[in-house]
Image (spheres, coloured by chain):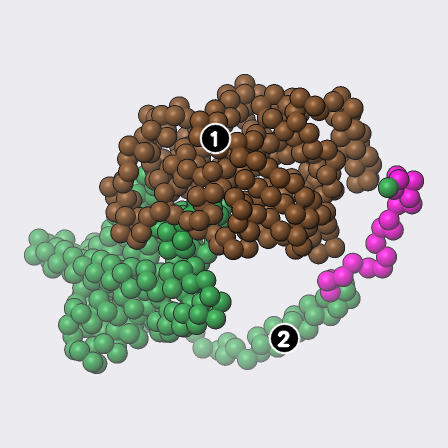
Chain colours: A green, B brown
Amino acid sequence: MTSAKASPAPLGGGPPAGHVPIRGRGLLTLLLLGALTWSLTTVPWGEPLVHPGGLTVLGEMLVAALHPTVSAEFLGIALAASWRTVAYATAGVSLAILLAFPAGVLASGVLVRHPVLRALTSGASRALLGVLRAIHELVWALLFVAAIGLSPFAAVLALALPYAGILGRILAEILEDVPPGPLAALRAAGAREWQVLLYGRLPQAFPNMVSYALYRYECGIRSATIMSFVGLGGLGYQIQISLDDLRFREVWTFVYCLVVLVVLVDLWSGVIRRRLLA
Amino acid sequence: MFELVDATKRYGPLVALAPLSLTITAGERLALMGPSGSGKTTLLHLLAGVIQPDEGRVAIAGRSTETLRPGRDLARLVGVMAQGFDLVPSLAVVHNVLAGRLGEWGIGRSLLSLVFPRELPLAQAALNRVGVGTKLYERTARLSGGEQQRVALARLLVQQPRAILADEPVSSVDPARAEDLLTLLVEVAAEDGRTLIASMHAVPLALRYFSRVIALRHGHLVFDRATTAVTEADLTALYDLRQEEARDVR
């Protein structure tokens, strides 16, 4: 009891654990520097960085950037292409959210109390989500074009599947990391786990989830552009056609359209985010 | 209402609660006192049926807490007010209050209520009773700490448990509000003959608002008396024990 009289506890005996000794670190640094120096000798220094005609083309591109094509007829094409890209992204991300919701809830394992059952359902959903996002949307697009041809469905599905994988995984993580206090209070009030999900987890996860889905929508617009390179129409497709004919001024018109789209989505999501946080 | 027989709780080598036996009758107003780490919260959790004793037994209304699974049955017996009120900040006040009904509700009603609140008069009456009747559709996060605490109390009113357990209900409010809140808590409990058990840090408030005091230290019972029988000596003892504890830490 009278520990006030007891001698103070010894303060640390020996060096602190969990440290790489200074000498070891120095040696490692030397080794890495050596490897870097050696790797420089393998670079073919003789060849020019840009091929002879490259600089001229680069110059043409830069000049074209200041003079994009703005004829009414052409702007009509650009607008239609932009609209198509937005449509693909919107449909794709919407479908992704629909798929991600059940898969994400299952993957989080918050509904199943039985440990074995939870490991099974959560593991299976996580594996599924993992497969979906392991394959890039461009690869999905190639697969779907091969399977169902150059149809808008190919674009929407190709976008929806990997995005469902990403959104589902993030939803699972957000649901697991929700502050536990309110959840315990709901259980104490007699709520079952699915009610805890409805009244505790989802409302607390909602602002984060919306914010992240909006960010993904912005990414979706860029992905939809890239995807249309495989022939699915939209901005990317038009950029490719113009680029093949070296009509840089047209390319820039489409690029500016893309920039405007992304900026608009960003502004819109900013407004929604502010409203959610207010 | 509550019965403990040699209830013991350990966390590893630490004895959170040494064998404790006590009976709490319905309608009592009981304050748990003692320095932090004395076992107040452990005792409160045992009484709430949230944790089970390692040895001995805890019974609520004659039923062992081991047979009372968390859920509707337990929710009808005890309601818990946590220290942080633990409301869902992004929900409207009305849903946080009606969450007290979830034990009684099925899936359809629970879902529907998030769009069209069910049993609205019940929620409105509870909020009126605790003095925040105008905040029905406000987002809970916008309410002040004191208002949130009242909403948490309204949720308990809607849940209608036979006993209310509160963990440090006034530790985060200023002294004037603390008195208001304790008055409300005591009144609300008395109206339906509910048992009220609260862990209390402030000695004067504990003595003024409660009928019985249980003082713990290091998981051991120091005294268990009617508030009127608590003497200066008891408090001095508790105070001195605190001093000794401070020395132990050093």
Task: Name the spot of residue B26 as percent of width and height, x first.
Answer: 53, 35
Q: Is residue A74 above or below residue B197?
A: below
Left or right: A260, with A10 as reference point: left
Which element type, helix, strand or loop, lies under badge 1? loop
Left or right: B3, with A59 as reference point: right
Q: Nearer the viewer, mark 2 or mark 1?
A: 1
Query: Which mark, by number, is residue B234?
Result: none
Q: Is residue B22 above or below residue A250?
A: above
Label 1 packing within 10 angstroms: few (<14), some (14-19), many (20+): some
Query: Which mark, by number, is residue B193?
Result: 1
Front residue of B34 and A90: B34
Question: Looking at the picture, which amino acid does disc 1 mark?
Answer: Gly
Q: Give me the residue at 28% from left, 44% from top.
A: B113
Q: Mark 2 sits on what residue?
A: A35
Task: Name the spot of residue B21 as percent of width and height, x first.
Answer: 67, 43
Task: Name the spot of residue A229 as percent of width and height, x first.
Answer: 23, 70
Asked if marks 2 and 1 fall on the same chain, the answer is no
- In the image, the segment drawn in magenta is A2-20
